[in-house]
Amino acid sequence: MSSREHGAAWSPATRAVAAGRPARTPDAPVNPELVLTSTYHSSQEPTARMYARFANPTWEALEEVLEALEGAPARVFASGMAAVSAVLDRVPPGGLVLTPRGAYNTTLALLDELAAAGRLRVRRLDTTDTAAVEAALDGAALLWLESPTNPLLEVADLRALCAAARAAGALAVVDNTFATPLVQRPLDLGADVVVHSVTKFLAGHSDVVLGAVVTADADLLGALHRSRTLHGAVPGPFEVWLALRGVRTLSVRLERSQASAAELARRLREHPAVSRVRHPSLPDDPGHALALAQMRGFGAVVSLEVRGGAAAADAVCAAVRLWLPATSLGGVESTLERRRRHASEPDVVPEALLRLSVGVEDVEDLWSDLAQALDAVWSPGGP
Ligand SMILES: *Cc1c(COP(=O)(O)O)cnc(C)c1O
């Protein structure tokens, strides 16, 4: 019996470890093999794999893990953006796409490019305002959601919005990169498609770039698979193998990172150099109640605003010694970044906002390093 067959009763943390393994044949390896090949032996009959742009056994192992975690079949892609792009390709010519005003900047940049080229139309809105999204859905082809959003950590009512999208005939897509399937399962909340940057928490070690799509809709899955094959946005088997290794520890990494993120959010709020902290764990965070209703945790990304504007925020990045000033997130190592340093970052993101990705280091070390960096830029007589 394969892990896929009896895995349904296990908890998600267990499935992340047990799924996607070879059959229990004596002397067979316990781990999926790294299959490096560009082609397969053929036969007179058509075969399932044929050529390595179509399929690879190492991809299939990670796809089985993602299916076990998200609850529907998955396909891995060369990057999160390759997965995003394949999904956006499903929008009919001229179709209207609704997105959060603040979302992953490259998703928004791609949508803007497609709109400028006349391929589709795009409208950004406040996805925490459920009524506003419902009103805008009339005639929309696709509702793009992130929750929590990157980097404002805004929480959208996924159940209500996915139901409204369905009623309006729009495809509901959720980028679940920030929450991961251990914290939030958008398909259970009514989403049609889940997208991941596997680069982040799923792989978890800042050593690969990888993406995935997940959907229970067989026709849509077939179209996304075909898109991967035709556009050639295929991952390297070694990257997938590393992500498989990384995902085994997702549950323990997240448990630690989420607990530290909540603790740091609480302490940061008391620091005089910080004007605002965003994390759904905070009882007065605008997303707190919704997060409790639809998530099993609050995630390991925290955003804060530094008093004194962009220069002060940059100075904090320059003053940390343990935290790594770097873009990206979801690794075992804690990183921080002032997001508006990117020209493509939407201007709803404050200039002085630092996005913190909390890793698995000791929380006291993380705190003392952050605190000394904030102390260094803050002067009582200053701004
Ligand atoms: C990083 C990220 C992406 C893009 O993924 P890549 O693997 O970098 O291509 C998409 N969405 C979110 C929320 C991300 O953080």
Image (cartoon, helix red, strand yellow):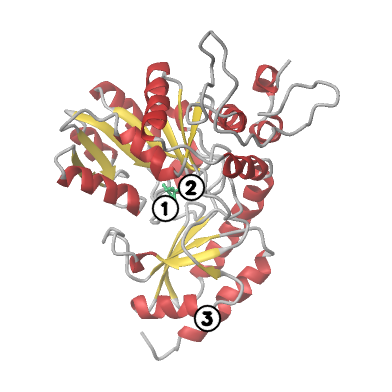
Q: Does the closest atom of ligand 1 sit within 8 Å of the Cβ of label 2?
A: yes
Along the horizontal axis of the image, is 164 left or right of 313?
left
Along the horizontal axis of the image, is 259 left or right of 376?
right
Along the horizontal axis of the image, is 133 left or right of 214?
left
Along the horizontal axis of the image, is 137 left or right of 188?
left
Quarter containing the C terminus: bottom left
Q: Marks 2 and 1: CB-CB under 8 Å? A: yes
Q: Name the kind of residue labelled 3 in the image.
A: Ala
Whole-percent x, y for residue 109 in the image = 27, 51
Which residue is under mark 3? Answer: 319
Which residue is under mark 2? Answer: 178
Q: Is residue 159 above or below residue 313?
A: above
Question: Residue 105's image quarter?
Answer: bottom left
Q: Residue furthest bottom?
A: 381
Quarter containing the N terminus: top right
State which tag comes first along the sequence, 2 or 1: 1
Which residue is under mark 1? Answer: 153
Whole-percent x, y for residue 38 in the image = 55, 33
Decide which of 17, 261 is in the foreground and name it.
17
